[in-house]
Each structure stands twice: as structure tokens, then as C-alpha cells.
Amino acid sequence: MIKDSSGIRKTDVINRRMFIIGAAKLIVFSGIVARLFSLQINDNKKYLTLSDKNRIREWKLPPTRGEIVDYFGNIIAGNLKVYQLHIIPEQVENFNYLLTRLKNLLQLSDREISNILKSKKKLKPWESIIVSENLSWSQFLKINNYLYDLVGVKPVMTISRNYPFSDIYTHVLGYVSQPNEKDILENEVVQQKFVPGMKIGKLGLEKTLENYLIGTNAIQRYEVNAYGKRINQLEHQKGQQGSKIRLTLDTEVQKLSAKLLLDKAGSISVMDIYTGEIIAMHSSPSYDPNSFLFGISKDEWELIRNNPLKPLINKTLSGLYSPGSTIKPIVALSALENNIIGPNFKVKCTGKTELYGQTFHCWKEKGHGFMSLKNAMKQSCDTYFYEIARLLGVDRLKITAEKFGLGEKVLGAYFKNEKKGLFPNTSWKKNNLGKGWVLGETLITGIGQGYTQTTPLQLCLMTAQIANGGYSIKPKIIVNNNPLNFNEVKKSIKEQNLLNINTKLVKNPKNLRIIQEAMFSSTNEIRGTSYRSRIDDKKYQFAGKTGTAQVKRISKRERELDLKIDQIPYNDRDHALYIAYGPYVNPRYALSIIVEHGGSGSKAAAPIAKELFKLIIDREELRDKQSNFEEINI
Amino acid sequence: MFQYNKLNSELSFFQKVKKLDFILIFCIILLSAISLLVMYSTDGGEILYHTKSHFIKLLTFFSLMMVISFFNIKLWHITSYFIYFVIILLLIWVSAYGIKVSGSQRWINLYFIVLQPSELMKIGIILCLAKYYHRLKIENVNSFTTIIISLSIIIVPIILVLSQPDLGTSILIALSGLIVLWLGGVKMKYFFISLISFLISLPFIISFLKPYQKMRILTFLDPDRDPLGAGYQIIQSKIAIGSGGITGKGFLKGTQSYLEFLPEKHTDFIFTLFSEEFGFVGSICLLLIYSIIIIRIIRIGAISRSNFAKLFCFGFAFAIFVYIVVNLSMVLGLLPIVGSPLPILSFGGSSLLATMIGFGIVLSAKINHKQMIA
């Protein structure tokens, strides 16, 4: 070994360079420690949150929908336990075998089987496939019996909407069903609470009161792994059922309405004339909302859709009808209010009136002779009303009609499908049809034909406001935290110390008194149009006005033929209308009845009122015992 | 040449044992114990494949280390070139008959072990260059031929490893080799010149990278650009480490690893799991143990009389340091993801084997630190 100078120098070089490296190492290590410090100590909170976000996942469960009850607390839209069948694919040993077993047990169709296979492809293996949403009890038992053979199948009990009175509330409540994309986007609350399998209101109050009814989701928190598989449950947060909604409707009256309109197309509305509470509101024919819960079958849907009586239309709110003679109380009132006529004003009816070469017929061909206002109302003389309408003019008539609620929505925003109707005047025609008003049109407006279009509920409100002495009321269908006691309203009207919801609609109460008397005689005096449907018992006695609305112009030939109702084709027959209020002494309820293509009001519509008044007044005592307050602000 | 006759030094067995560096051995055993605990945790708190396999490898390679340490350092000096060439041959064999896993051909099946020769090259290159510079006269260190020869020693294995392809390991081999050049006395200005020219040519080098390697660099620069794809590993790793806090989530309670959010938690990302469960305190302790190991190796180098032993010890100490730094910087999001295991802790036979051989030679240097080599 030669120890030359270069050898010693070399060792020095190595050591010196090692020292430089050592210093560099120290710096780099401190850098790493600093990084650890910043991650683990400075940003610890941030990363802890991120780590929890990673591992904790929330599962929202469908919320339980609030119940809807009638005035007496009977559930009319409730929740029912239903039995469902789920498959959890990752637990299934032999999928095809399972499917054939289920197919035999539940009689599944080929389409249902292919749907199951489709959703199997879409879902993760630990997510459950819903095989059947609504198993019958016997099917459920069958499945439970064979469960040992059906590995991976899970019978599940869940809650579904249920309408115990099937079709009698359909047009009020609507129904719930699976939401489509648009339904979800439209409503932010639904967007927030949506979970697959949840049903939302599609129509009627179920839709408009969605945000009250929906409730809050129950939430389950699970720890999941990187692939989203649940490892264990951490927490269960209970959901809250949606608000209970109590309606002002009476199921018994509703049922009777449905019965009276059975196999007919038409509508019945009943209202409290002081509080505006709607006691019944039925549109016939109806359909069973329960059919929509799990998806309606195509055949059933076609049947409903193609029914000539049009069950899908809510006739009470969106059916537009010429009011016919039911407008006459308003025409007469308007003439009196505007001092066009006095109570003793008389017109001679010869059966027809000529105007500028046009003939206007009274319904009674031979004419009524000299008619006073009371008699004209009682016998519904058209000639009399042609004359006073001519004297009054359509513009002044419209003002009165609008005061009583025609041409305006009755329930406002509660029903998306409610129509406004139309009451014409000269400027309306000019603006909308571009033509000047013709006097002849005033005449036919005076008997409720022509351009005028009203909904049955508007006619009911109009009648109620005539009955209560000419004070506006605000119709309501939901019992809320703003109760109106009918006695208080009545008292405030009597003492002229009006509550802020009521306004006075007439200048001279005497004028309205005349109209009321005329309506009384129309029902309770001989030769009155609805005399045959009267009730003599003072307790039930009511006053009304018939109406027969033409759906097409009657030709001269038809007038001469004077056909019986069954000789006219269904769609050409007149609509039968009737408005009434009762009891006559101390009135409390108003109603409107429409029977589409029912013929004359006195024959087809007025007898229905007789049945209704009996029931409504019998139930009054029971109804008054119920509280009219609910802790809800709608 | 007479020294070569006595490869086994005149020391008796007990004298050798007495001369062992017990602090170093203790640290290695401590790290092994920690690595077993961590493996047990990655297996989900059960003794499964990883724990068992790692235990057997630790036991075998630790014994191997002890055997190596009892041979005279001269033996390793003599066989250095031979070992280097054997590993080169293995690398060539790999490129011809290697086992292909997900696109890279890095392994050969030796039936009792699946070997990754590139890992062994990390030690081989230090041995080879240490011997080369041991002999070299200081005047010749910066001569043109010397530099060409030493660079060739580095470049040949790198080309072989890059073709596998394995960027991470080739960088580590290059760094291990270059450090010996540095220690050997190659002029600093050469290092600076090459560093600058490397930086200038970096864009061209990048254009030669495979798409997945470019993606890794882009991901490193901004992990959030593709949080579920390329950036997933680094984001999840940072979340795991960051959520560990000061004292960690507790042994077997690391949710990130337990719920399988951590990728490659057995191998390259083992520190992530450790840090999540044992926190800042645990991580600092781990770094401390590594520091002690490095310092002990440097100390052995410092007391060694032969330049070969010095160069090897210093080189190996630096290599260990680089492995740790590259691995930790990667999991901490300071460097792009390049496959590089953490010494002793990471699961993987070849890396553990190379590390243990290195420790064995260092211990041998310690026992024979007074040995002069011509």
C-alpha cells in the first residue's frame, strides 16, 4: 500500500464533499418535516373534513307524505303500508334461476322481466332492484314461504299514498305518481328531497300543496369504502311527516253529489254563504286516483281518456258553460241597482221580440202575457229580460256581474286548471274580436247566452253572495289558522260592522230582497220553474233559479218540431243548470248544479238540489260542532 | 497483492460480533417491527398474505445481511465489478424473458423469488463506482476518459431500466451513481454545467416521455385537474396524511386505508397509512429512525480507512436518503408520482433484498474499518 500524498488528499476530498451533502440532506429533511407539519397540523381540519366526506355517505329515504282529511277528520288521502319485493344482485347465487322462480310465483310478464334485467345492468351490485312495487298480501305470503329458495330476495314493507274514497275526491285532490324530470326541476323543495321511488303530487291539491305535504326525509348515514359499498351504519335521523291538511269538504255531501251525478257529466258545488267554506265540489264522471300510484295500465288510461263524458276535466273549475237563465237574478239586480226599472216594471211577453228584423224567442212559444219582475223570474220569461237588458246595456250589466264574481277565478292559485270564464262588454268585443257590439248581443247576454262563460263554482259563489245579502265572501277549501265563524260573519253583516274580508256589493239592500223573493217564488210558488223540486218544510226550504243553456243555435225547423230530449243527439242537448240557496229563512248554504246535456234545468238539475239540501241541513249541527281552526298558515 | 490471500480477516467470530454496529442493527430491527405492524394494518388487522410474506422476507434478508457483514470488506471490493456485470446480465435477461405486468417488463422469476434486478442495481452501481474511484488517482479523476468510463457505468444500466420502462428506478440508479462521482472528486463545475444543460433539455426529454408519465407530471402540478383519475392517488394520499393530525387516528383506525381509498398502500404509499394512523408524532419518529440509520452509516464511512468503504458507505447513505426523500415527497405531493419504495417499510422483495445487502456491506465495513485495501 503506497501512502502517497494524493491518497490522503483523496480521503479529504471525500470527507469534505460528504459534509456538503450532509448539509444538503439536513435542509431537504427539514423541508419534508415542514410539509408534514403543514399537512398534519396546519391543515388537519381541512383534511379531516375531506376524509369524513370520503367515508361517510348519506342515504335519504322517501319522506312520509302528510295526510289530507275532510272537515270531520276522515282521511281522504292517507298512507298505506305496501309490500314490495327487492332483489340485491350481489347476494343472488343464480340470477336466471331466481327470475324463473319469481316469474312463476308472481306471474311476471316478459316485459317486467326485461325491465328487471335492464335495471340490474344500471345499478351497482349492492343496490336493490325493485321487482314489484305493490305486492298483494297473498303474494307477499307466498314469497315469504319460499324465501329459503330465493336467495338475494328481500321482501320490504314501505308506505304508499292511498285514496280510501277512490273517485269521489279525485278532482279536488288530484293524485301522486313518479315525478318526471320536469316535475323535479320545477319545484326546488322536491329537488332537495327527491329520492328514487318517491312520489309527488301531479294534479290538484296534491300538486299545489306539495311543499306542505311532502315532509322531510329520514336520513341514514353509512360509512362506505372507496367503491361506495356500505360498511356500517353510523346514524339514523328520523324524518318528519308532512303537514296534515284539513279541507272544508264534507265526505257525506261529496258522496251524495257523486251518487246524484252517477253516469252523468256535470258538476255540483256547495258553499257556506258566510264563511265561503266549500262543502262539496264534485265533477262527474271521475276516475280512481289509486290507479296512478304504481303507473296506470295503458288500457285503463285509454278508457279514461276516451270516455265521451270526459272524466279528466274538472268541470267545477275548468268547465265553461253559458249560465243560461241562472244569470237572470244578476240582470234583474243590475237593472234595479241602476234605476232602469222599478219593482213594478212590467213587460208584455208575446213569445218573441223583434229587433232590427231579428227575432228573439221566449222559451214559451205562446208568451207569458204581462210580466212583473217577480213573475218573470219565477217563470223565467225571456222576453222580460230581453227588454230590461236592452234598457240596461251590457256595460252596466258587466259591472254588476263582476262584483258577484263572474269572470274571475274563485279559488285563485290552489288549482292550476281553474278557468276565469268571461263576461263580455262592448270594449271586450272590440278589443278581442275587432267588431262593434250589436244590440242583439245585449239581449241574449241578458238571458245568459252568447259570449258569457262561467264555471259552476263561479255560479255557486254568485248565488252565495246573493243569499248573504250582497256581501263579498272569500271562498276557501282548506281549514287554516284564520277561522271564520259563520255567526260572527252574519252578525257583522247584520250590524253593518263589516269584517275586512267582506265588502258591500249592492247600493240598496231592498233591490236584493226583491231578487231573493223572486228566487223563492221560482221554487216555492205554483208555476215556478222548479216548483216540483220544492221542500215545504221550513227547515229545508230553499230558493233557486233554473237555467237551460243552449249548446247550439236552435234552428227554426227544430223550434217547430219541439223534439223530446231523447230524440236529440247527446251532444246537441241543452245543459241543465240550477242555482239555489237555503234554508230560505236564515240562509246558510248556496249551491250550483250543472248536468251537461241534461235538458231543461227544472227537470234535470233542480231535483238534485232537493236531495242535497236535505242532507246538508241535516249535517249542519254536526258540522258546527267541529272546530274550524287548524294550526297551518295557507 | 498479498492482502488478497486472506479474504476472511484474522478476527475471530466473537470479535466480529463485538465490532458490529448495534445502534444501526437496533434501528433496522425497529424499522422491521414497524413495517410488520403497518403490514398488519394494511391487511385489515389480520395476519394475512402481506404480513406473512413480509415477515418471511425480513427474516431471510436480515440473516443474509448478517452473513454478508461477517465477510471481509475486501471480498466485496474484489467482487464489485463481477456483481455489477451479473446484474447487467440479469437486466438484459429481463428485457428478453422478463415477466410483464401492466405494460412494464421488470421482473424475472427465479422460482424461490420474483426478482426485480433494477432494484439490485441501486446497490450494484454504488459498489462498482466505489471500486472504480477507490483505485483512481486524484489527478485522473477529472480526465476525459475517467469521466467517460464512469458515465458509461451509469448509463448502461439506466438505458436497460428505462426500456422496461421504469423511470423511477432509473432516476434512483442515476442519483446513486452520480453521488459516487461527486464524492470521488469530479469537479463541481461539471455538475453545475450538466444540471443546467439538463434543465435546458428538460422540455425535449419530456417530449420523449410516455403519455402516462407526462400525465403524472401534469397531475403533480395540479392534482385537482382530474380528481378521480390521475390525481386520485395524490389527493387521497394527502387527505390520509393530513387527517392524521398530531397523534394520528390510532393503530388499525386509519379510515382512508381501511376503506380502500388509498392506492398501492402496501408498497409506494405505505408511509401514507403509517402517517394516518400515527400522525405527525409517529412520522417524526420514523424520520428520526431513518436519520439515525443514515448518520450511523456515514459514521462508519468516516472511520473506514479504505476509500472503497468510505465511498460505498457515503454513497449508500446518500442512496437511502434519496429513496426516503423521493418516496416521502411523492406521497406528500411535493414531487410527481414515480414508483419508488420506502426502504424496509414498503412491501416488495427486491427492494428489501437490495437494502439489506447494502446494510450488510456497511456492517462489514464497520467490522473491518481498519482494513486497508490497495
Image (tube, rainbow, N blue to C red):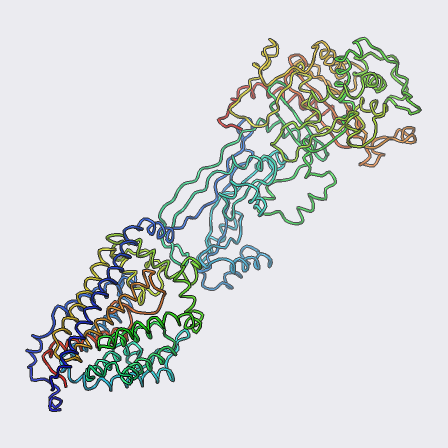
- Please give the name of the residue rendered at 35% of the width and 82% of the height, measured from the top-left corner: B94
- Quarter-of-image position of residue A240: top left
Residue B220: x and y in percent read 38, 62
Against A578, residue B55 (above or below) is: below
Furthest residue toward right? A357
Q: Quadrant of the N terminus of chain B?
A: bottom left
Position in image of residue B373 (x %, y %): 14, 84
Question: Picture coordinates of residue A543 (x, y %)?
Answer: 71, 17
Q: Is residue B78 above or below residue A350?
A: below
Whether residue A573 is situated above or below residue B96 in the rendered picture: above
Q: Is residue A60 left or right of residue A564?
A: left
Q: Say which quarter of the image contains residue A18.
A: bottom left
Q: Nearer the viewer, residue A181 or B129?
A: B129
Q: Is residue B50 visible?
A: no
The one of A565 and A91 positioned closer to us in this rendering: A91
Residue A79 vs A537, above or below: the answer is below
Q: In this image, B320 relative to B339: left or right?
A: left
Choose top left, top right, bottom left or bottom right for residue B86. bottom left
